[in-house]
Image (cartoon, grey):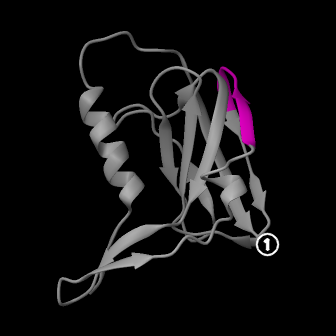
């Protein structure tokens, strides 16, 4: 059975490992939402919230396009304040023979590498839905 290895998830994992020390713990707001592409749920997409300063938070969409952000392995949410949002489906996958296959990006650049998405995370619950358009 093929294994999916989201490249951004690997990067996030490394970020989590470097952030497990006893440093200052910022205030967080919980963040959930739904991502659609042309009106259809976007599954297996990585959702990144990058604050102006500090560690990003990330989540992955399920089959319904729903996500919840994690700040660290043990803390849900995102730092309070302005966040730049990037959404990506690009990943690496390993087939049954161990060959690495690159899965192409479905999300247009204006939502990831050239993102125009910006949100404000506030204390408490935050629900951010993203209705992406392929054209």
Magenta stretch: dominant SS? strand
Question: Looking at this view, is 97 or 78 the one in front?
Answer: 97
Point 76% across, 71% down: residue: 134
Q: Residue 94 colored magenta? A: no
User: How many numbered marks appear?
Assistant: 1
Of helix, strand and loop, which one carries label 1?
Answer: loop
Question: Looking at this view, is 107 or 74 the one in front?
Answer: 107
Q: Quadrant of residue 55?
A: top left
Question: Looking at this view, is 94 or 121 the one in front?
Answer: 94
Residue 45 relative to residue 85: left or right = left
Quadrant housing the C terminus:
bottom right
Q: Which percent across, then down, holds residue 46? A: 51, 56
Q: Which percent across, then down, holds residue 88? A: 55, 59
Q: Quadrant of residue 16?
A: top left
How would you rate the neighbour count of disc 1 (Cα within 10 Å): few for under 14, some for 14-19, many for 20 or more? few
| Extreme residue in the bottom direction | 97
Q: Which percent across, then down, holds residue 36? A: 72, 65
Point 46% across, 39% down: residue: 70
Q: Which residues are magenta?
A: 117-125
Q: Which percent across, then down, holds residue 30? A: 58, 32
Point 47% across, 22% down: residue: 54
Q: Is residue 86 above or below residue 66?
A: above
| Extreme residue in the left direction | 97
Q: Is residue 71 above or below residue 60?
A: above
Question: Looking at this view, is 123 or 52 the one in front?
Answer: 52
Point 42% across, 68% down: residue: 91
Q: Quadrant of residue 32?
A: top right
| Extreme residue in the top direction | 24
Q: Is residue 71 above or below residue 7?
A: above
**Mark 1 highlights which residue?**
38
Quadrant housing the N terminus:
bottom left
Q: Residue 118 colored magenta? A: yes
């Amino acid at each position: 059975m093929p294994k999916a290895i989201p490249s951004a998830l690997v990067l996030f994992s490394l970020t989590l490992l470097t952030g497990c020390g006893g440093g200052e713990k910022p205030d967080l707001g919980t963040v959930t939402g739904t991502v659609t592409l042309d009106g259809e749920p976007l599954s297996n997409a990585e959702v990144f919230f990058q604050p102006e300063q500090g560690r990003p938070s990330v989540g992955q969409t399920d089959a319904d396009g729903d996500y919840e952000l994690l700040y660290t392995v043990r803390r849900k949410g995102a730092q309070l304040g302005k966040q730049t949002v990037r959404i990506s489906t690009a990943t690496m996958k390993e087939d049954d023979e161990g060959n690495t296959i690159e899965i192409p990006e479905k999300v247009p650049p204006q939502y990831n590498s050239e993102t125009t998405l910006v949100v404000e995370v506030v204390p408490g619950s935050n629900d951010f839905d993203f209705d992406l358009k392929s054209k």
